[in-house]
């Protein structure tokens, strides 16, 4: 039976494919305040702006490709039972070939009903005012906005608590509850951390190996390390 490798990925891995993150700069996401485009309050205030913002993100997603980091994680499936828990809303992990991907913060290529959060549709084009579910309720982006609960978090906890190895890639570990997963890794499980600016992780009971570099640089090294020592 293959050992279970759980990988928590963040914006850093997608940034290398050309997808920007608001945390890279001045608190703006593609020129917009996060409060305006990624909160329930922003949606209530100006739904047209929010829809246009995610329509642009959806179009941009069609123009970018998975990078070496995404592809190397997919290749690890040959040797390990790889579960990716991602904070990213793009589909780059899936397009690279990863089969077990849990999106904590929603998916850009899906929409859902404003009244029924379980009413979810695949959606690759633009979403506009007047696009309704079958009960005539407006559809919204299937994104977990700031201030909303994270429905997939319980599943993420279960995956994390049964890991044989755990890796953190391309995330500053600043966004909760996702950042709290590292504290739930069993104490005997080694943790690997790939990020150009890794933070200090206090009170960590696990062995920790850090790769202070970009995901596309660090993941191949992590792959070689895992295959040499832990397969």
Image: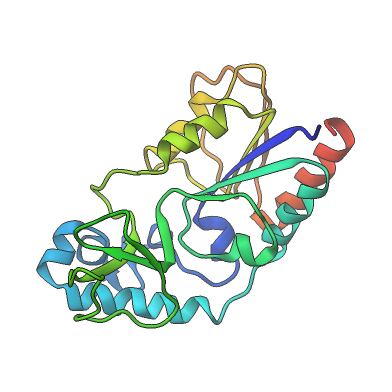
At x 36% / y 73%, what residue is drawn?
30
At x 25% / y 48%, what residue is drawn?
148
Quarter of the image where the C terminus is located = top right
Q: Position of residue 58 (x, y in %)?
A: 43, 76
* Residue 206 seen anywhere in this rendered image of the structure: yes
User: Left or right: 178 with respect to 68?
Assistant: left
At x 25% / y 71%, what residue is drawn?
134
Q: Position of residue 164 (x, y in %)?
A: 69, 28
Quick one: 129 or 200, which is closer to the camera? 129
Quarter of the image where the N terminus is located = top right
When asked about the image quadrant of residue 122, the answer is bottom left
Q: Position of residue 53 (x, y in %)?
A: 31, 76
Q: Position of residue 109 (x, y in %)?
A: 45, 70
Residue, far left: 45
Rendered position, 131 above or below 195: below
Quick one: 104 or 204, which is closer to the camera? 104
């Amino acid at each position: 039976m293959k050992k279970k490798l759980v990988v928590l990925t963040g914006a850093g891995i997608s940034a290398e494919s050309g997808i920007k993150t608001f945390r890279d700069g001045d608190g703006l996401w593609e020129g917009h305040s996060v409060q305006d485009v990624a909160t329930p309050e922003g949606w209530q205030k100006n739904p047209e702006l929010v829809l246009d913002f995610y329509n642009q993100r959806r179009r941009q997603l069609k123009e970018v490709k998975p990078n070496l980091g995404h592809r190397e994680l997919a290749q690890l499936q040959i040797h390990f039972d790889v579960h990716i828990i991602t904070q990213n809303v793009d589909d780059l992990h899936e397009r690279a070939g990863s089969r077990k991907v849990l999106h904590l913060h929603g998916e850009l290529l899906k929409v859902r009903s404003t009244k029924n959060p379980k009413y979810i549709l695949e959606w690759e084009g633009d979403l506009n005012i007047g696009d309704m579910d079958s009960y005539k309720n407006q559809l919204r982006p299937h994104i977990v906005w700031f201030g909303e609960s994270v429905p997939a978090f319980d599943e993420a906890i279960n995956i994390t608590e049964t890991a044989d190895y755990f890796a953190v890639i391309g995330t500053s570990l600043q966004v909760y509850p996702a950042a709290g997963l590292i504290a739930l890794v069993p104490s005997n499980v080694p943790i690997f951390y790939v990020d150009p600016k890794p933070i200090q992780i206090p009170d960590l009971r696990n062995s920790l190996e850090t790769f202070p570099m970009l995901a596309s640089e660090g993941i191949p090294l992590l792959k070689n390390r895992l295959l040499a020592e832990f397969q």
